[in-house]
Amino acid sequence: MILSVLAATPLVGALVVTLMPRTAAAARAVKVVALASSLVALALALYVTARFDVAAGGYQLTEQHEWIGPLGVHYALGVNGIGLTLVLLTTVLVPIVLLAAWADRLPAARSVNSYLAWMLVLEALAIGVFCATDAFLFYVLFEATLIPIYFLIGSYGGPGRTYAAVKFLIYNLVGGLLMLASIVGLYVVTARAGDPTYLLSDLSGLDVGTTTERLLFLGFMAAFAIKAPLFPFHTWLPDAAGTATPATSVLMVSIIDKVGTFGMLRWCLELFPGASEWASPVVVTLAVVSILYGALLAIGQDDVRRLVAFTSVSHFGFIILGIFTFTHTATAGSTLYMFNHGLSTAALFLVTGMMVARRGSASISDFGGVQKVAPVLSGILLLAGLSSLSLPGLAPFVSEFMVLAGTFTRSVQAAVLATLGIVLAALYILIMYQRTMTGPLQPEVEHLRDLDHREVAALAPAVVLIVGLGFFPQPLLDLVNPAVDEVVSHVGVGDPPPRTPADLDGISFSGSYAPLSEPTDTEGGH
């Protein structure tokens, strides 16, 4: 019941905000109510975490009610360590976003009520997605997340917002339709085996033929690859982030895009382990391409918002690489990376958004020497940028190192190529910082004001977590490790034995990612 209350809290806040007066005089009260509801959700999430038994593992705080009996659909919620980590990320970021968006300038005829209500609705849907243990319920919530983002981009974004919103919607609807085909397929398969069901506990033990399993996997994987976003399905993201408000970009990239990588772990690996192993060479290749391609395009950007978007394409490549390496170290690193990337990207989007709002331009070339007049802004930008390039001592370093270490035991080629992404990250972050913050003070930014107390307060929690988890990530690792063990063991691959220097003699770095194991039965299923 507590998970339902947690998901419903932002919805109640959204309803209250929607019903409040839409006048300038009431705007402050609207913002206070929205922020308060998000803080209540955060308090509930912390309570859920306190009740979660880390040592026990598995799905906890479960609730299950029949929803559509003839189809075997249930309203079923539960969290394991992975889902709870992302629920925490969601409830931590939304108050930060609401406080940072306090002074956002909205288009004429657009009310702050709707703007904040859509954010709270999105928070509720995200919590539901991370807690759903019924495939049909997950699909409904997965698709429903498109609605708030579409309106947040299309109604409150900058120039080109209509094009970006429609492109975002079309890409993700196509992925959703492919997943729907697999959802229907699950009904057919389970109905033939007995009673139809969509419960994760029932589906994880489902025995289907190899061809059927692979087809069902492809429907889910296509939707998650678009959402993640994985190359070459990423092109909607730079356009959306380039026109959306900073607050919308944070919700979209730091939270909702994580649904893609979360779905790979919960639904692809747990329901279709054989197909996941079969597809791993292609997925790992695309992940490595995403890492390098996203980083290279980020280096060439003049729009700082698009630069941050392309850095996320690269970072999601690391996350997906770790998931489809099927080692405990890499999978735990990917799960931790989802949380840490959410923090660092949120800080980067918000602080660059504050820069753009002050200057009236997102072009990097329109800045220069800003640290002379806005030292606090430049300092937080530097920390957020260093976090994005995974500087040791900051949170993303631990997770990225774990992904690469785990990948190295499975594929030296993939690990070496992915490591080049770290070098490129240093380039795109440091070049951007040098061009905007250092050098001669541009006349146009002489009067650019520094961050005020509200903006510092909004960014401070993310900064504290980035630094704190950089030095002490163990609490989060303790939370996710049991769930990671279950996922990796379900795939049935396991960690390979450690390599010795003798094992590395003569390794070719020009080969492709080798299959993890040879199939033993063409129709054996799981």
Image: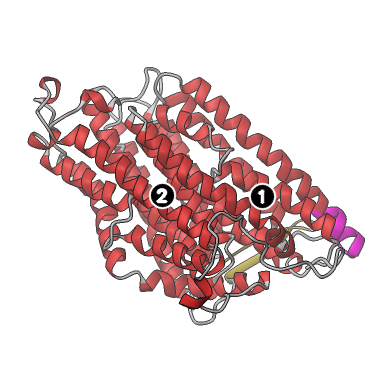
Kind of residue at disc 2: Gly
Amino acid type of the residue tagged 1 in the rendering: Met
Q: Position of residue 429 (x, y in %)?
A: 29, 42
Q: Quadrant of the C terminus?
A: bottom right
Q: Disc 2, disc 1: CB below 8 Å?
A: no
Please name whichever residue, 414 or 286, is drawn nearer the observer in this view of the structure: 414
Q: Nearer the viewer, residue 123 or 263?
A: 263
Residue designated by label 2: 421
The residue that disc 1 covers is 221
Q: Is residue 190 magenta?
A: yes
Locate the N terminus and report the quarter of the image it occupies.
bottom right
Residue at figure coordinates x 83%, y 55% from the top left: 212
* Mark 2 → mark 1, Cα distance in angstroms: 24 Å
Q: Which callout, 2 or 1, points to the residue nearer the camera?
A: 2
Q: Is residue 251 visible?
A: no
Q: Is residue 494 left or right of residue 115?
A: right
Q: On the rendered structure, is 245 left or right of 187?
A: left
Name the residue: 25% across, 22% down. 360
Q: Pointer 2: residues within 10 angstroms few (<14), some, or many (20+)?
A: many
Above or below for 265 versus 11: below
Quadrant for residue 374, please give it: top left
Query: Residue 299 location, x and y as percent?
Result: 35, 36
Residue 335 falls left or right of residue 265 = left
Q: Secondary structure at mark 1?
A: helix
**In terms of sequence position, does the residue under pointer 2 or pointer 1 come before the other?**
1
State the extent of the magenta-drawn residues as a range: 186-195
Give x and y (percent) for residue 525: 81, 65
Q: What residue is at 34 percent from the left and 43 percent from the top?
A: 97
Residue 162 can be seen, yes or no: yes
The residue sitting at 24% across, 25% down in the picture is: 365
